[in-house]
Image (spheres, rainbow, N blue to C red):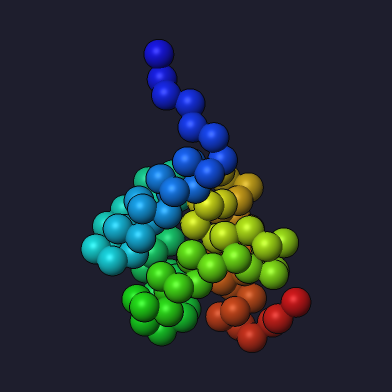
Amino acid sequence: MGSELGPRETHRHATRAGEEALVLGGPSASCGSPGSSRRTKRVLGSEEKARHWMLKPSRALTGAIPLGLLDTDIGANAVFDELGRIEHGVFV
């Protein structure tokens, strides 16, 4: 039987996995796509800024932590859309 995690435990797990992916440049939490950590670093300019942005609640994402959204297609799309807005200077 698989373990069921509540929202807090899931977030902690996602944060650890995502932070490791951002630090090591390995696969991200986004459906196994290595592109999210690379894109975040590219858009924001550094690994440190990317890590900070991925772990901080975002107003544009209705207060959600970007890393916590990467486990679903809809959430990952919202994060990538926000990165696109940042990249192109469109702030909501």
Q: Is residue 41 visible?
A: yes
Q: Is residue 31 above or below residue 27?
A: above
Quarter containing the N terminus: top left
Viewed as shown, does residue 18 lie left or right of 20? right
| Residue with the most extreme left position | 24
- Of 16 and 27, nearer the camera is 16
Q: Position of residue 3 (x, y in %)?
A: 42, 24
Viewed as shown, does residue 59 lie left or right of 88? right
**In percent of the image, x 36 and y 78: which residue is there?**
48
- Of 50 and 76, nearer the camera is 50
Q: Position of residue 27 (x, y in %)?
A: 31, 53
Residue 26 appears in which quarter of the rendering? bottom left
| Residue with the most extreme top position | 1
**In percent of the image, x 69 and y 69: which residue is there?**
60
- Of 54 and 31, nearer the camera is 54
Q: Position of residue 83 (x, y in %)?
A: 56, 71
Q: Is residue 59 above or below residue 35?
A: below
**In percent of the image, x 36 and y 53: which residue is there?**
16
**In percent of the image, x 72 and y 61: which residue is there?**
62
Quarter containing the C terminus: bottom right
Q: Is residue 40 above or below residue 18?
A: below
Residue 57 appears in which quarter of the rendering? bottom right
| Residue with the most extreme right position | 92
Q: Is residue 34 visible?
A: no
Q: Position of residue 7 (x, y in %)?
A: 56, 40
